[in-house]
Amino acid sequence: MECCNSKNSHKDFATQCNACGKIGKPVKKKTLEHLLKEDRVSLVRDTQYYFCQTPYCDVVYFSRNSDTFYKADLKVRVGLKETEEPIPVCYCFGYTRKIIVEDFFKNGRSTIQGEITKKVKQGICRCEVTNPQGTCCLGDIAQVLKMIGIPS
Ligand SMILES: [Zn+2]
């Protein structure tokens, strides 16, 4: 019976992207308010939003009541969803994928990774309101290095 289908359970529905159907990552309202274009901010409701991590999906944020914000609704480029430079990775200090890769080959190691780690420890990053994912970029930097074949 349709109503007993576990795929339709409310819990799954609540966190699945309205477009691609993949499970989203919870983000704070604060993150949306800082990164959405000015004319979009008023549409943000008092509800839980999720970030869609699917690279080919145009949706960035969604909620269980079908609120949907697309790439074009944001003031910044969502690195995870871009294939052409500039591909932002670290939003607090403005490092793109290209800069991170070039730094690695120039120095034989990632000085940027070390620098960001240091700054994070000093508490001078603002990932919550600069990074569309609302989280620290160090994981994404490790991902970039892994992509060019460097074990993290
Ligand atoms: Zn999606």
Image: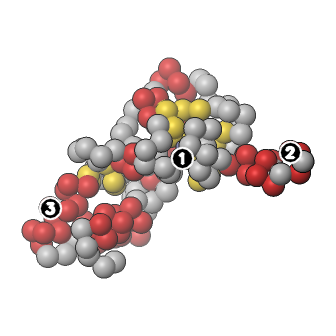
Using the image, tell me which numbered label, if any, was put on residue 2. 2
Residue type at tag 2: Glu
> 16 left or right of 85?
right
* Mark pair 1, 2: CA separation: 27 Å
Q: Which residue is mark 1?
A: 52
Using the image, tell me which numbered label, if any, was put on residue 108. none
| Residue 123 against residue 8 in the figure, above or below | below
Q: Is residue 30 something one can see in this rendering?
A: no
Q: Nearer the viewer, residue 101 or 112?
A: 101
Using the image, tell me which numbered label, if any, was put on residue 102. 3
Task: State yes or no: discs 1 and 2 in contact (Cβ < 8 Å).
Answer: no
Label 2 residue SS: helix
Residue type at tag 3: Glu
Question: Is the residue indicated by label 1 positioned so its CB lies within 8 Å of ligand 1?
Answer: yes
Q: Nearer the viewer, residue 145 or 147?
A: 147
Q: Quadrant of residue 98?
A: bottom left
| Residue 151 against residue 95 in the figure, above or below | below
Of label 2 and label 3, which has the lower sequence position? 2
| Of the two numbered discs 3 and 1 in the rendering, the one whose residue sits closer to the viewer | 1
Q: Residue furthest left?
A: 106
Whole-percent x, y for residue 54 in the image: 48, 49
Q: Nearer the viewer, residue 106 or 10?
A: 10
* Mark pair 3, 1: CA separation: 28 Å
